[in-house]
Image (cartoon, rainbow, N blue to C red):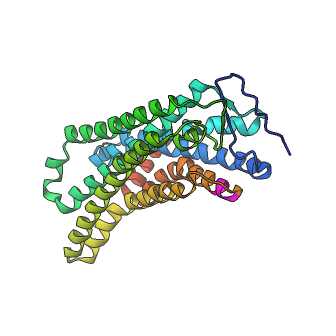
């Protein structure tokens, strides 16, 4: 069994414990995570390229999907390369600046995804409940503004939480019980009362996760009502297929994120492992599955892939 070197390169650095307590699991994860990361890069890059090349995909739905794919690319890249490097080495250190930067970027992108998913739900609501006015309502300027709101909201939330977290004194504690820098793990290192940070964090959860989730539920309640009124079974099936991919992505993202709160401050070894595996799921597995879900269930994307491949063969 390899021993974890807990001596950081810099006095202001941190040690990312990761999965070092389970060395056999860690080596298996090295292979699995590497494969999943490559698939994440390829799948999300393909969505972005296709949405740019095929004129049929120049619609609000694929504009937001391209934003989601770009977000997922950055989201995974903010943590996975560092994690792979740490698994292969005995030293698990990350500099103070690197840790704060990782915390800021990861939290920014995660917060942005919550808001962006609610924007995508609104797009589906307009498409099904207001089909005749869809192109009028979802014009390019509004789409760009909604995407900008998602990105600005996510980065603003992260900026506040990152600054408040970085100001906490650590009193010599530098071992983070995760494979990346995150707010809950950083709060556990503080040697002072963190109630202000915790109140702000839970308030941010309401604004960034609960409110967008409420908007998603509101959109889908109205979508279901509209679909029920459709008389033809073919029409109902088409409407559900239009929303199925997005709904599945929402369930995976929010399901894993909400489950993660149960292990926010784990005490037992098994609870720590479950918490880290959940963090790995919403930090890597969900971004990898997103393009697959949208591709496998979407005829337009399949047609765009065949079209692009056909051009290359010519």
Where does residue 155 sit, x and y in percent of width and height? 39, 34
Residue sitting farthest toward the top: 10
Q: Residue at x 76, y 51 (%)?
A: 22
Where does residue 221 sit, x and y in percent of width and height? 26, 67
Specify whether residue 143 is painted magenta.
no
- Please indicate, yes or no, whether residue 25 appears anywhere in the rendered image: yes
Front residue of 270 and 169:
169
Specify the principal SS of the magenta part: helix
Front residue of 149 and 249:
149
Residue 107 position (above or below residue 11)? below
Report the side of 55 relative to 25 (left or right).
Answer: left
Q: Residue at x 33, y 35 (%)?
A: 152
Q: Residue at x 57, y 24 (%)?
A: 97
Q: Quadrant of residue 189?
A: top right
| Residues drawn in magenta | 270-274
Report the side of 1 relative to 128 (left or right).
Answer: right
Q: Residue at x 22, y 71 (%)?
A: 225
Residue 157 position (above or below residue 39)? above
Where does residue 188 sit, x and y in percent of width and height? 59, 42
Specify whether residue 271 is painted magenta.
yes
Residue sitting farthest toward the right: 1
Report the side of 276 relative to 160 (left or right).
Answer: right
Q: How many marks?
A: 0
- Please indicate, yes or no, whether residue 311 appears anywhere in the rendered image: no
Front residue of 174 and 157:
174
Where does residue 222 sit, x and y in percent of width and height? 23, 65
């Amino acid at each position: 069994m390899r021993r974890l070197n807990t001596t950081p390169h810099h006095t202001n650095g941190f040690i990312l414990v990761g999965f070092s307590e389970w060395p056999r699991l860690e080596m298996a994860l090295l292979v699995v995570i590497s494969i999943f990361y490559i698939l994440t890069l390829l799948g999300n890059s393909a969505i972005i390229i296709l949405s740019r090349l095929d004129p049929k995909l120049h619609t609000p739905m694929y504009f937001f999907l391209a934003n989601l794919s770009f977000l997922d690319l950055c989201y995974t890249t903010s943590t996975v390369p560092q994690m792979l490097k740490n698994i292969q080495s005995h030293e698990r250190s990350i500099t103070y600046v690197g840790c704060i930067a990782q915390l800021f970027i990861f939290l920014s992108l995660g917060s942005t995804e919550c808001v962006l998913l609610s924007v995508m739900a609104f797009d589906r609501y307009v498409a099904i409940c207001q089909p005749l006015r869809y192109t009028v309502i979802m014009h390019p300027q509004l789409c760009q503004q909604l995407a900008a709101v998602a990105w600005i909201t996510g980065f603003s939330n992260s900026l506040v939480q990152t600054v408040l977290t970085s100001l906490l004194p650590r009193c010599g504690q530098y071992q983070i019980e995760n494979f990346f820098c995150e707010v809950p793990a950083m709060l556990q290192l503080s040697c002072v009362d963190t109630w202000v940070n915790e109140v702000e964090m839970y308030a941010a959860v309401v604004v960034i996760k609960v409110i967008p989730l409420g908007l998603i539920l509101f959109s889908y309640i109205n979508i279901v009502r509209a679909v029920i009124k459709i008389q033809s079974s073919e029409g109902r099936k088409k409407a559900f297929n239009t929303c199925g991919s997005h709904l599945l992505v929402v369930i995976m993202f929010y399901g894993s994120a909400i489950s993660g709160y149960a292990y926010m401050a784990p005490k037992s070894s098994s609870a720590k492992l479950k918490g880290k595996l959940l963090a790995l799921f919403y930090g890597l597995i969900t971004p990898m599955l997103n393009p697959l879900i949208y591709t496998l269930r979407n005829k337009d994307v399949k047609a765009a892939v065949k079209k692009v491949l056909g051009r290359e063969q010519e």
